[in-house]
Amino acid sequence: MVAAALGKINTTIAITSTCIGKGIASSTTASAKYRGGLTRANSTAQTQRTKHALAAPNSAWSRVANKQQHFGRRGAARAFRGNVVMAAGPSVESLKSARADLEALIKKEHCAPILVRLAWHDSGNYDKSTGDGGANASIRFEKELGHNGNAGLPLALSLLEPIKQKYPDVGYADLFQLASATAIEVSGGPKIPMRYGRVDAQSDKEVPINSRLPGGAAPFHDADGKHPEKESKNQTPDHHLRRVFYRMGLNDEEIVALSGAHTLGRAHKDRSGLVSMTETKYTKDGPGRTTGGMSWTPNWLQFDNSYFKLLKQAKEGRGDPELLRLVTDACVLEDDGFRPFAEKYERDEAAFFADYAKAHAKLSELGSTFSPPGGITI
């Protein structure tokens, strides 16, 4: 959210929220809503969409007998859950309107970091070897919200729920990923080449095992296999990042590009346990619902390549003690495989933006089943 935005702490790809704070006491109540009511509302909307879709004699949804031809063998199994035929995705109009509402929300609440973090953590538990996890909105269930690294995310869900209710044909998985891409763009970053139509997880039975998200400091856990919580034999940060992101099917270039999203957000001492200060000159006045924490960059609501520039300064002995620099950050300039990409992004912001946009889009689709199969673009 590398990073947030993906274990033991919420700072590796988890981009630390600017929104977690005054409302945190109510986040337990917000979370409780997701134990059933919100899922039922979503299911009702999907059922209504399905009825309309099935009524169209020439629609793909009416051709149930040909579902394997339309979806493929594995896609059909996931697009037809139980006796319910999943609807054919959100309308372009709903997606565009939801995006406009998200832009207004982000500007009002200064909450870009937590929205990126929510989406990344929904995606970041994907395992290519087992095919489970990924961007299917299973993070909305309390079972997954309790996983390592997801503290505070019920608040992100509560921020997005009014928009979900306004646009019931937009699924949760799509909404989370749309919010993340919009947050990057609103913060000055690149336009992400997104597609929509993800099929939502229907229950917490689709929640994958815990401890797949990355940590930010030793002792590092394995983060993969049948026991991802086990302490890794290799405790180097570069090995840990590769173990996490290779499990998802990402490569070194994508790891470094996604690390650059730490230009956004903060980490808090009472949540991550890794930062040395409760506030800095960059965070003591917010903005947002909360103050304090440590940020990776001075302008932690601006998406640019300053993360890489500041890492270089720190490596040269010119680091700012009031800025955060985890070992999983430092290693992108120290590891031989990561360094060429970090140096390129430090020199060339346009190159960083181009590579980041591709990596973000790839992350946003991990583990997703799309309906229609080719997805929907806006």
Image: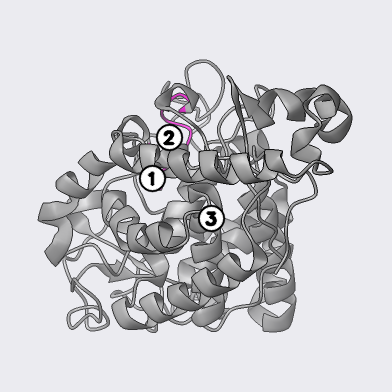
- Residue nearest the observer in this picture, 44 or 345: 44
Q: Nearer the viewer, mark 3 or mark 1?
A: 3
Residue 372 makes an appearance in the image:
yes
| Kind of residue indicated by mark 3 | Val
Q: Position of residue 66 (x, y in %)?
A: 86, 26
Name the residue tied to disc 1: 217
Magenta-colored segment: predominant secondary structure:
loop
Give the residue at the far right of this rendering: 69
The residue carrying pointer 3 sits among few (fewer than 14), some (14 to 19) or many (20 or more) residues within 10 Å by Cα, namely many
Find out whether residue 172 is within the magenta segment: no
Find out whether residue 213 is within the magenta segment: yes
| Mark 3, secondary structure of its residue | loop
Up-down: is 223 above or below 162?
above
The image's mark for residue 315 is: none
Which corner quadrant holds the C terminus?
A: bottom right
Q: Which residues are magenta?
A: 207-218
Between disc 3 and disc 1, whose residue precedes?
3
Name the residue tied to disc 3: 170
The reply to whether the C-beta atoms of the residues labelled 1 and 2 are less than 8 Å apart is yes
Q: Position of residue 281 (x, y in %)?
A: 22, 83
| Kind of residue indicated by mark 1 | Ala
Q: Position of residue 228 (x, y in %)?
A: 47, 24
The image's mark for residue 220 is: 2
The CA distance from mark 2 to mark 3 is 37 Å
Q: Position of residue 72 (x, y in %)?
A: 84, 29
